[in-house]
């Protein structure tokens, strides 16, 4: 299993920044070229490349347990934090420059940055969507990054800002019409192995949230692979609607309708899967770390059920909710008034859009406080009884609008990589309780690969290779262009290095240039 | 190939951050205390982290997504 993280890169000259960032990382961490000039694998088995949209994506190496995934996620953040801190002038002085683990764009660009998960499995891919969707929908109560609905003109907290970008239950696209379940079927391994590729998750800062995210999902995948999946199937009537209901409810008491007419909370659905995994925790088909995940999974669900706010130093969304609520109250605005403010703001935005007004409609203009007349005087008059009956006042509209931008910046800053990040700074003060079992030696994970599997072989070869620049690395192979041979990593569990000549139907031909061309085509 | 040797004496072997395993029962009250600590710390941290112009910051970070 592994996780991909797309980082938002702030700053004006992003193309220059991203080139500089890659150069710094390539200089400081031993690596090997990937299949494009802006693509590199490292000695810890991970990969960094420039993704579409000109932002860096860092992929963890393939790991066999959630603890290693979290170690490598943290190591990747640390590696990039050091690099971003070394950006030369004038790049480092640009407004907003930095790397951010933020899942959505609040500037109106409707962008979302992905944090994809991969899980190896052997069962047929078509056996997964129906069985996995209820887990993916309900896990949001501990995997949500927290933030705001990016499509709302007001301030609408959500456990999962990315949920609004998921518009269907099952889909093959990753850039539009995204689905909760992604049907991409690209194994990156030899026949018999499949890769489940999920795009519904979010970049998280909390170790334990990341650990539960990949641990619980890997265990549900293991249930399917071991033919232990609990029957009958829980089938949600409307998975996208259920995800949004769960995400919009920080009390975690919202229910979703099943096809059989029952209503279940996210906690209840999660307990259904936890029960099935726990029942088989000693089964030979389940991983050795099953029991440990079950124990933390159970206590997390207990805490969510009893008092979700008790997790306000543990889970990303709960930490953010506590901070945001405090910030709102410091501005003399009541958190409970936000839905009413949202109605007011949405109505004003709609009215301005429907009017013939062209230009920037400031709060002062729409309220008639400028020398020019308001473009929507009738709307303001019609809204005034609503404003007063809800205990609001027009004088507070400007502070609410300013607060909205500030909260969005706070959400962006929460996952900023390096010392400027909110989460990072809170962690330094020691107030967070987010540690995951066994996640130690993060520094070592910057250079060392996982102890088993093909990532181990990849990393060890990159560490010891005398001429890495004469190689091209990909997930399932390393090509030695000088010796015209390739290291076959198509078996995810490979233990011993096995070099093969380039003339091989499973490789890519005997011409190194042709081979590179083919690799690039595969990578695209 | 080299065999990886873990540094068993390294400082990093010790847990770096307080464990995230949720508390239950009466210990929930303790986590309430931790929440207050968080809010006290957040005040100072936020004042350092926020820019003076959130709108400009959001514009500077605006970009196309990937995937």
Image (cartoon, rainbow, N blue to C red):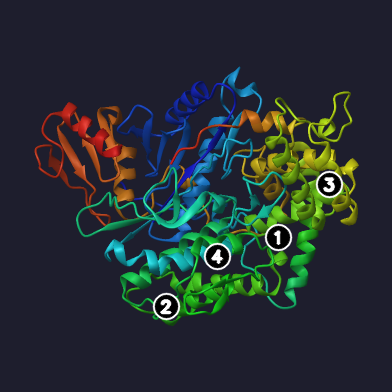
Residue at disc 2, secondary structure:
loop
- Distance CA(mark 1)–CA(mark 3): 40 Å
- The residue at which mark 1 appears reads as A312
Residue A209 image point, x, y percent: 57, 59
- Please tell me whether mark 2 or mark 3 is closer to you in this view: 3
- The residue at which mark 3 appears reads as A382
Residue A479 image point, x, y percent: 22, 36
Q: Give the residue displayed 48% in from the left and 67% down from the top.
A: A135
Observer-nearest of A244 and A132: A244
- Please tell me whether mark 1 or mark 2 is closer to you in this view: 1
- The residue at which mark 2 appears reads as A281
- Distance CA(mark 4)–CA(mark 2): 29 Å
Q: Contact (CB < 8 A) between labels 2 and 3? A: no
Same chain for marks 1 and 4? yes
Observer-nearest of A520 and A400: A400
Q: Contact (CB < 8 A) between labels 1 and 2? A: no
Relative height, residue A262 to residue A42 (above, below)? below
Q: Chain of mark 1?
A: A
Q: Chain of mark 3?
A: A
Same chain for marks 1 and 3? yes
- Please tell me whether mark 4 or mark 2 is closer to you in this view: 4
- Distance CA(mark 1)–CA(mark 2): 29 Å
- The residue at which mark 4 appears reads as A242
Q: Contact (CB < 8 A) between labels 1 and 4? A: no
Please give left or right for residue A458 compared with residue A336 in the image: left
| Quarter of the image where one finds residue A228 | bottom left
């Amino acid at each position: 299993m592994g996780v991909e993280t797309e980082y938002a890169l702030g700053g004006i000259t992003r193309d220059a920044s991203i080139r500089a960032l890659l150069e710094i990382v390539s200089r400081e961490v031993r690596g090997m070229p990937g299949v494009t000039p802006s693509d590199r694998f490292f000695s810890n088995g991970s990969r960094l490349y420039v993704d579409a949209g000109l932002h860096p994506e860092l992929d963890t190496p393939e790991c066999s347990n959630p603890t290693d995934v979290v170690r490598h996620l943290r190591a990747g953040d640390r590696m990039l934090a050091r690099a971003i801190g070394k950006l030369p002038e004038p790049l480092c002085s640009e407004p907003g420059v930095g790397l951010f683990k933020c899942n959505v764009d609040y500037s109106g660009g409707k962008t979302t940055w992905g944090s994809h998960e991969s899980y190896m499995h052997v069962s047929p891919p078509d056996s997964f969507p129906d069985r996995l969707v209820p887990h993916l929908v309900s896990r949001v109560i501990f995997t949500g990054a927290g933030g705001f609905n990016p499509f709302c003109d007001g301030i609408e907290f959500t456990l999962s800002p990315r949920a609004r970008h998921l518009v269907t239950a099952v889909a093959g696209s990753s850039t539009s019409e995204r689905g909760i379940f992604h049907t991409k079927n690209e194994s990156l391994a030899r026949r018999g192995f499949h890769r489940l590729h999920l795009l519904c998750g979010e970049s998280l800062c909390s170790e334990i949230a990341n650990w539960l995210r990949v641990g619980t999902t890997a265990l549900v995948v293991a249930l399917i692979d071991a033919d232990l999946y609990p029957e009958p199937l829980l089938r949600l009537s409307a998975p996208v609607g259920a995800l949004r209901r769960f995400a919009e409810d920080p009390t975690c008491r919202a229910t979703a309708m099943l096809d059989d007419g029952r209503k279940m909370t996210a906690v209840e659905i999660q307990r259904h899967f936890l029960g099935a995994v726990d029942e088989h925790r000693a089964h030979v088909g389940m991983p050795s770390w099953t029991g440990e995940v079950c124990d933390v999974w159970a206590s997390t669900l207990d805490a969510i059920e009893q008092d979700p706010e008790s997790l306000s130093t543990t889970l990303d969304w709960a930490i953010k909710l506590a901070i945001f609520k405090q910030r709102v109250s410091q501005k003399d605005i009541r958190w409970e008034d936000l839905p009413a403010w949202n109605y007011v703001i949405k109505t004003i935005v709609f009215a301005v859009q429907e009017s013939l007004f062209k230009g920037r409609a400031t709060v002062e203009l729409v309220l008639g406080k400028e020398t020019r007349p308001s473009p929507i005087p009738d709307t303001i008059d019609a809204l005034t009884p609503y404003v007063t009956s809800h205990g609001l006042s027009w004088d507070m509209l400007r502070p609410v609008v300013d607060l909205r931008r500030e909260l969005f910046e706070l959400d962006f800053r929460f996952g900023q990589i390096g010392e400027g990040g909110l989460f990072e700074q809170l962690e330094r003060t020691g107030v967070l309780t987010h540690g995951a079992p066994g996640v130690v030696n993060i520094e070592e994970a910057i250079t060392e690969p996982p102890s088993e599997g093909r990532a181990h072989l990849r990393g060890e070869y990159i560490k010891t290779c005398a001429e890495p620049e004469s190689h091209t690395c990909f997930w399932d192979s390393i090509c030695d262009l000088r010796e015209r041979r390739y290291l076959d990593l198509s078996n995810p569990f490979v233990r011993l290095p096995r070099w093969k000549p380039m003339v091989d139907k499973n490789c890519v031909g005997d011409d190194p240039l042709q081979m590179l061309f083919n690799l690039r085509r595969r990578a695209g | 190939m080299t065999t990886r040797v873990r540094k068993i004496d390294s400082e990093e072997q010790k847990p770096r951050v307080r464990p995230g395993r949720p508390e239950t029962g009466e210990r929930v009250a303790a986590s309430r205390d931790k929440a207050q600590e968080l809010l006290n710390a957040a005040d100072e941290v936020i004042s350092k982290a926020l820019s003076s112009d959130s709108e400009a910051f959001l514009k500077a970070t605006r970009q196309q997504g990937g995937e």
